Image (cartoon, rainbow, N blue to C red):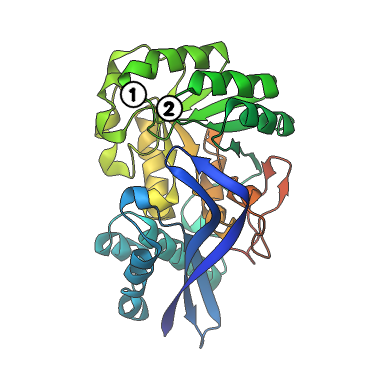
Amino acid sequence: MRRLTVAIERFPIAGAFTISRGSRTEAVVVTARIADAERGVAGWGECVPYPRYGESVESVAAAIEAQGDAIAAGLTRSELTERMKPGAARNALDCALLDFEAKAQGRPAWEILGLTAPAPATTAYTLSLGTPESMEEAARKASARPLLKVKLGGEGDPARIAAVRRGAPDSRLIVDANEAWRAETLDANLAACLAAGVTLIEQPLPADDDGLLATIDRPIPICADESLHDRAGLDRLAGRYDAINIKLDKTGGLTEAVMLAHEARARGLALMVGCMVGTSLAMAPAMLLAHHAEYVDLDGPLLLARDREPGLVFEGSTIHPPEAALWG
């Protein structure tokens, strides 16, 4: 019989990770492990609860634990989608169930999902929000990386954008405002991005106040993050966004993420595969979508002072698909 166990784990961040909503020095993750001792099979998944979406570590752990009886009774991934809403808790369980399936069947998870085999990908490397001076220095240290993701915060962002470009003159830049821009600052910030040759702008306006994006020229593609969780939210993006950021903690797992990717493609949207700050266990399932996306942002383990063992293999900004010992 399958048995579910839940754990809360803490991994220190190398320095601090700062965005427009605050700063933290550790990644707190929740893991779900599904094991059948008689068969000698176990699968696991990791999620990162996010207060922006009304989640706490305690509420997510409790939501996972509440599915213990259903897991023991043979709950499937499709049934899980019906039982739980999208979010971090469902993500951990969906990925654990998929890992369990892969181990039990002796088949890779990508094959079970009908995908092609994953391949190495180039991930963005995130620069935390700070002063223009500190961000220029951080950009200079990371300037050998081909793709940088720049966290912005609202007031003073044009100076930050220019500073990062000075520090990393040859890197492609993604800027991520995390909903911090407003209608009155949009023009100035967009102009600064154009001047710096920015490749993509992620979630410039608040998710509940982004209608303005449908009325402006968008010479730089704009990507929805907080404005989209799963397929149910695709309709409201029409005319506002050119790309979407697929995060498993938003979609509620890889099962929904794969279907979201297919439907978004059919609507002409470009894809980013992103992450919260978590370990290699959280990145591993997302790697199955990475080679289908124009933008990959799975640098969570690179921001940590300590990762899981075994973890994903990084060579500079190149991230390699997971080994079965980790996941899938």
Q: Is residue 220 above or below residue 79?
A: above
- Pick the front one: 93 or 264: 93
| Residue 34 seen in this snapshot | yes
- Say what secondary structure mark 1 lies in: loop
Residue at the (64%, 67%) spot, across then down: 325
Could you tell me the amino acid type at mark 1? Answer: Arg
Query: Mark 1 touching mark 2, by CB under 8 A?
Result: yes
Could you tell me the amino acid type at mark 2? Answer: Gly
The answer to which image quadrant residue 11 occupies is bottom right
Q: Is residue 316 above or below residue 150?
A: below
- Say what secondary structure mark 2 lies in: loop
Residue 5 image point, x, y percent: 45, 77
Residue at the (52%, 51%) spot, across then down: 24
Q: Is residue 3 above or below residue 317?
A: below
Q: Which residue corresponds to mark 1?
A: 182
**Distance between the alpha carbons at the discs numbered 1 and 2:** 8 Å
Q: Residue furthest bottom?
A: 38
Q: How many marks?
A: 2
Residue 287 image point, x, y percent: 56, 49
| Residue 328 seen in this snapshot | no
Q: Is residue 107 above or below residue 140?
A: below
Residue at the (33%, 45%) spot, across then down: 230
Residue at the (42%, 81%) spot, across then down: 2
Quadrant where the C terminus sits is bottom right
- Pick the front one: 256 or 106: 256
Q: Which mark is residue 154?
A: 2
Image position of 86 (left or right of 29): left
Disc 1 packing (10 Å; few <14; some 14–19; many ≥20): some
Image position of 89 (left or right of 128): left
Residue 124 image point, x, y percent: 60, 36
Quadrant where the N terminus sits is bottom left
